[in-house]
Image (cartoon, rainbow, N blue to C red):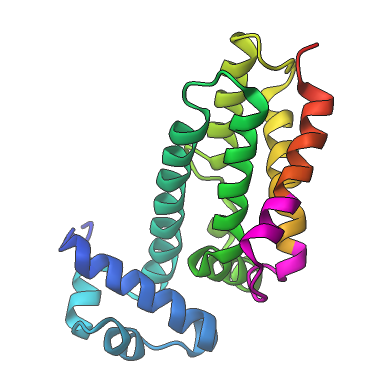
């Protein structure tokens, strides 16, 4: 018989997810306890079991729910910066700067990355692609910009991968994936360079 779990309060779920990420990063999956997560979240241990069932499901769902929230935020970023585009360089620059800031300063994103690297061997499900994926959403947007005559994109998926790397890669390296703070001006400089390089390859002549 399939166990029925409560959807529960969105505020409590968010608190549990934040606490779970913090405790799992700090202690590792094996040493992390549901008691510690409940204390950090300000909820009862029973609430965590009612919402998530057990520690393994809590671990996987906390990462999945965090990724889903990040994807929703990314979609909003695309709508703000690449929704209606007249000046392709200005639009991509706005996108690149904001995305680079989000990548280099998001503690949740850094936590998910560290947990995935540390625990993927024990939890292969962590490596399963999200649907929709950030790269897929960006690929669709670049394909639309190409259809509007603003870019020359033969392979939107490849172009999205390149753009993502170009606008976030150096910010990640310079900040040690969020461990070292970067000034706004430095993030802008790194992202702008990536956009210029991307446009050399993909701007429609």
Number of numbered discs visible in the structure rendering: 0
Nearest the eye: 1 or 185: 185
The residue sitting at 76% across, 66% down in the picture is 174
Nearest the eye: 72 or 68: 72
On screen, residue 69 versus residue 151, left or right, reads left
On screen, residue 68 versus residue 14, left or right, reads right
Q: Quarter of the image for the C terminus: give it.
A: top right
Above or below: residue 86 compared with residue 81: above
Residue 108, position as x, y percentages in the image = 48, 67
The residue sitting at 15% across, 63% down in the picture is 9
The residue sitting at 60% across, 18% down in the picture is 145
| Residue 175 part of the magenta-drawn span | yes
Q: Residue furthest front?
A: 185
When asked about the image quadrant of residue 184, the answer is bottom right
Nearest the eye: 26 or 3: 26
For residue 53, say whether it is visible. no
Residue 37, position as x, y percentages in the image = 34, 84
Above or below: residue 88 compared with residue 111: above
Nearest the eye: 146 or 55: 146
When asked about the image quadrant of residue 88, the answer is top right
- The stretch in magenta equals 173-190
Q: Quarter of the image for the N terminus: give it.
A: bottom left
For residue 64, say whether it is visible. yes
Residue 183, position as x, y percentages in the image = 64, 66
On screen, residue 42 versus residue 135, left or right, reads left
The residue sitting at 44% across, 84% down in the picture is 23
Above or below: residue 79 compared with residue 105: above
When asked about the image quadrant of residue 64, the answer is bottom left
């Amino acid at each position: 018989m399939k166990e029925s779990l409560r959807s529960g309060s969105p505020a409590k779920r968010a608190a549990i997810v934040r606490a779970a990420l913090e405790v799992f990063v700090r202690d590792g999956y094996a040493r992390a306890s549901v008691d510690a997560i409940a204390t950090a979240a300000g909820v009862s241990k029973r609430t965590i079991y009612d919402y998530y069932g057990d520690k393994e499901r809590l671990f996987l769902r906390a990462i999945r729910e965090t990724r889903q929230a990040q994807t929703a935020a990314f979609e909003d970023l695309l709508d703000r910066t690449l929704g209606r585009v007249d000046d392709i360089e200005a639009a991509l620059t706005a996108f690149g700067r904001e995305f680079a800031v989000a990548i280099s300063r998001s503690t949740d994103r850094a936590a998910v990355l560290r947990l995935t690297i540390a625990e993927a061997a024990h939890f292969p499900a962590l490596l399963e692609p999200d649907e929709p994926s950030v790269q897929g959403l960006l690929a669709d947007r670049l394909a639309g910009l190409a259809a509007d005559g603003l870019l020359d994109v033969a392979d939107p998926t490849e172009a999205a991968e390149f753009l993502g790397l170009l606008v976030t890669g150096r910010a990640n390296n310079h900040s040690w994936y969020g461990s070292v703070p970067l000034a706004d001006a430095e993030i802008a400089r790194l992202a702008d360079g990536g956009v210029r390089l991307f446009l050399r390859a993909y701007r429609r002549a």
